[in-house]
Amino acid sequence: MSSVSSQPQFRLTQPPSKVLHLRNLPWECTEEELVELGKPFGKVVNTKCNVGPNRNQAFIEFADLNQAIAMISYYASSSEPAQVRGKTVYLQYSNRQEIVNNKTTADVGGNVLLVTIEGADARLVSIDVLHLVFSAFGFVHKITTFEKTAGFQALVQFSDAETASSAKNALDGRNIPSYLLPEHLGPCTLRITYSAHTDLSVKFQSHRSRDYTNANLPVAPSAIDANGMFSAGLDGKKLEPESNVLLASIENMQYAVTLDVLHMVFSSFGPVQKIAMFDKNGGLQALIQYPDVQTAVVAKEALEGHCIYDGGFCKLHLSYSRHSDLSIKVNNDRSRDYTIPNTVMMNPQPSILGQQPVATHGPPAHPYPGAHFAPTTEHHQMMPQPSAGWATGGPPVPHSMPAQMNHNPYLPPGTMPPQMGHGRMQMPSHGGLLPHAPAMPPYRPDHRQ
DNA sequence: AGCACA
């Protein structure tokens, strides 16, 4: 028998193991993709990715040795190589008998996540964006950020380990949606592990750390900025007193902004209780009332500086109102109290939304953010795929897409027009929050949508 | 394209 001197011999001499070693993986590969890869052959009980100096190796551990053998055998004779995101991966038995890491599939970590933001522009990701992203899974108590050799990192504290786990499962390995980032930042990938911390120590509200449980915490001197108090800058973050009522002023109002439009835009973040519109200094302003401060904060952070319509029209500037409960004397086309059931029926003007947003009175069915955003599969089906933001660069990723990104930002599922959704998500200054202007734009006369 | 972390 002639010697199989070249590389196949290496593989043949590997003693079988229920752990497989994979290489040549795309570096974005997630553990979930490893599970998908191994699932046809047996029960994947553990995985580890981002192994090796290039982070392009991984391990898959099967429940049973025969399952590992089945996978190796299959790909040894298959004409189709194993692939992840279209990239051929090479697999062989590992020289280990089990994966040792801090987690198995029934993983319980702590309530604090260690988040590494990867990407050339990672350190330009603001703490507010992180807050927005993680708030989708539950109340975020505190965030601290810092730079280490690993890069730009953050500790994100949730109430409990379950919430942290759901955030980790959904977000690990994913990119921050580009429309949440300042324009033309490169992709920023989240790598998430559990921290050993249980309660972060946040001394100041600053651009590096926040305590969302303590609005009265002193503001760090470094965070006080003389001017841009209403701009969510990358480096400094204003701390004006938060409120459940937002004051919106609308810049470059080429199109009429109606009550219904405002209601639709702001409803994406939680139930809107009241809206009052008025003219001020020749421009339009509106007060939008949410049931709680938290919702208003999320809405403000997400919407500030965005345009309602494409082309930079009707740009929103948001600040916190001093009001906490608006007094709506009469429901008309400038003001409305959505908490009064009867008034839902009256619709004094045609709605461009095709559907009058339903007022939420009493406790909202889905408190925002919280459970509403929990990535439950049942919501997935009917939702458009959030391709713009959460795509991780490869083929469709079927699971663990955080469902909240279908709701939030910006459009509640019920009111999302079909034209919306892909690709047109809102970039800070050009993309509009709504796909259509209510009237024909002054230019692009017949350019549909 | 060739075996981690605690």
Image (spheres, coloured by chain):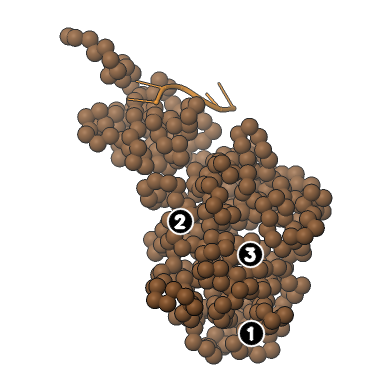
Chain colours: A brown, B orange
Badge 1: chain ID = A
Describe the element under mark 2 as helix, strand or loop.
Answer: helix
> Which numbered tag is attached to residue A335?
1
Q: Earlier in the sequence, mark 2 or mark 1?
A: 1
The residue drawn where x is 68% and y is 55% is: A233
Quadrant of the snapshot with the N terminus of chain A: top left
Describe the element under mark 3 as helix, strand or loop.
Answer: loop
Can residue A137 be seen in this snapshot?
no
> Which numbered tag is attached to residue A388?
2
A107, above or below A206, in the image:
above
Quadrant of the snapshot with the C terminus of chain A: bottom left
A210, above or below A18, in the image:
below
| Disc 2 residue crowd, few under 14, some 14–19, many 20+, Cα 10 Å | some
Amino acid residing under circle 2 = Ala
Q: Nearer the viewer, residue A236 or A287?
A: A236
Badge 3: chain ID = A
Residue on which the image places disc 3: A304
Q: Earlier in the sequence, mark 1 or mark 3?
A: 3
Amino acid residing under circle 1 = Ser
| Disc 1 residue crowd, few under 14, some 14–19, many 20+, Cα 10 Å | many
